[in-house]
Image: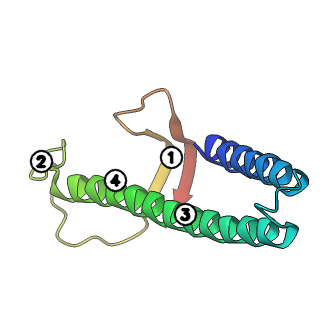
Amino acid sequence: AVLVTNGLDLGMGLVTLAYGGSLVLADSSELTVGELVTFQLYANVMTSAYQAINTTVNSFTRMSAAWQRLIALLDSTPAADLNSGVRVDLAHGDLQFKDVTFWYWSRPDNIVLRNINATI
């Protein structure tokens, strides 16, 4: 989209200069060099303002999509049963992990931890 917008901006600038230049060179006094340059500067100011607005709108669109994704994640319920497992009331001693391998259930081919050993 940026490439198309920049291409259109460049194309319009070239058309403006070509047509305005032909009017300046036509000896008909319809347009002076100063008026052509002034018009081109105003057109550049307007183009810059348009690009700034376009960037802001795109940022809001991305922010809205990210916000909707965040709300969907916060509203989702975990797939695991939170009441399963063994409750440990009080533990003494070391906590030791041996050859722990971990991956997320949604991506079983992407192993996050492989054969990790740790003592806490």
The kind of residue tagged 1 is: Lys
Tell me the mark number nearer the camera, choosing from 3 and 4: 3
- Give the alpha-carbon distance from disc 4 to disc 2, as whole Å: 35 Å
The kind of residue tagged 4 is: Ala
Residue at disc 3, secondary structure: helix
| Residue pointed to by mark 3 | 50
- Give the alpha-carbon distance from disc 1 to disc 3, as whole Å: 60 Å
- Give the alpha-carbon distance from disc 1 to disc 2, as whole Å: 23 Å
| 104 or 53: nearer the viewer | 53
| Label 4 vs 1, first from the N-terminus | 4
| Label 1 vs 3, first from the N-terminus | 3
Q: Which numbered disc covers residue 84?
A: 2
- Give the alpha-carbon distance from disc 4 to disc 1, as whole Å: 41 Å
| Residue found at x 56% / y 51% | 117
Coordinates of residue 116 in the picture (x, y in percent): 56, 47
Q: Which numbered disc covers residue 98?
A: 1
Coordinates of residue 103 in the picture (x, y in percent): 44, 38
Coordinates of residue 92 in the picture (x, y in percent): 33, 72
| Residue pointed to by mark 4 | 65
| Label 3 vs 2, first from the N-terminus | 3
Q: How is the image coloured?
A: rainbow
For the residues bearing labels 3 and 2, Cβ distance under 8 angstroms: no
Q: Quadrant of residue 1?
A: top right
| Label 1 vs 2, first from the N-terminus | 2
